[in-house]
Image (cartoon, rainbow, N blue to C red):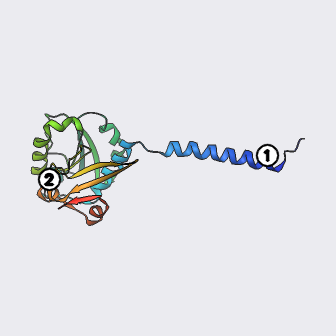
Amino acid sequence: MTRFPPLIIVVASLFLMLQTEMVFAQSARLDENEVKAAYIYNFAKYVEWPVTTSAQETSTLYFCVIGYAPFNASVMAPLTEKQLKNRRVSIRELTFDDDISRCNLLFINPQARNNLTNILKSATENSILTVSDIKGFATAGGIIEFIPMGNKIRFRINNRSARMSNLKISSQLLNLATSVIE
């Protein structure tokens, strides 16, 4: 039986550990849309909707997506396995012609930019939390705008728009935002 010098065993062990860590790190890394879906779920934890909205009268929280890829309902599908505020989460993919009044939260893809004014008006009237990665979304009247910062995703909150929609955003969430429009 041949014996390997201790140094070779140590080097081989370190090499195997590094390879394992690299594989684990790659599999644990989330893509941008999965991070956005996680943010959206957590945003909903820190928002209070008025009890008078039609979307509040069910045992389901409706997270809707309008516009097409890259961010779509399939990205948020894992959220349907969760409960939030003692309600199950349901994901809906909408077209521009669909009624958004049953949504609690609406993610607006960039393809909806041309319809943004009408979508935001309807969302405000129906107390819908609006989220988007459209540049300038919060200043245009949307409530939460995703902002890329280097290799991270941050967000800006338009609290004035939230109040106009009769939504109350927790101070904890407001403190995490890169900026808040009052």
Occupied quadrant, residue 160: bottom left
Total marks placed: 2
Q: Secondary structure at mark 2?
A: loop
Disc 2 marks which residue? 127
Q: Position of residue 23 (x, y in %)?
A: 57, 42
- The answer to whether one can see residue 86 in this image is no
Residue type marked 2? Ser
CA neighbours of label 2 inside 10 A, class few (<14), some (14 to 19), many (20+): many
* Disc marking residue 8: 1
CA neighbours of label 1 inside 10 A, class few (<14), some (14 to 19), many (20+): few
Q: Which quarter of the image is occupied by the N terminus?
A: top right
Q: Position of residue 176 (x, y in %)?
A: 32, 61
- The answer to whether one can see residue 105 in this image is yes
Q: Which quarter of the image is occupied by the C terminus?
A: bottom left
For the point 14% across and 41% down, the residue is 116
140 or 44: nearer the viewer? 140
Q: Nearer the viewer, mark 2 or mark 1?
A: 1
* Disc marking residue 94: none
For the point 52% across and 42% down, the residue is 26
Residue type marked 1? Ile
Q: Position of residue 167 (x, y in %)?
A: 17, 58
Q: Residue furthest front?
A: 150
Which sits earlier in the primary sequence, circle 2 or circle 1?
Answer: 1
Vertical placement of 98 versus 120: above or below?
above
21 or 73: nearer the viewer? 21
For the point 30% across and 58% down, the residue is 178
Q: CA distance from mark 2 to mark 1?
A: 65 Å
133 or 45: nearer the viewer? 133
Q: Residue furthest bottom?
A: 171
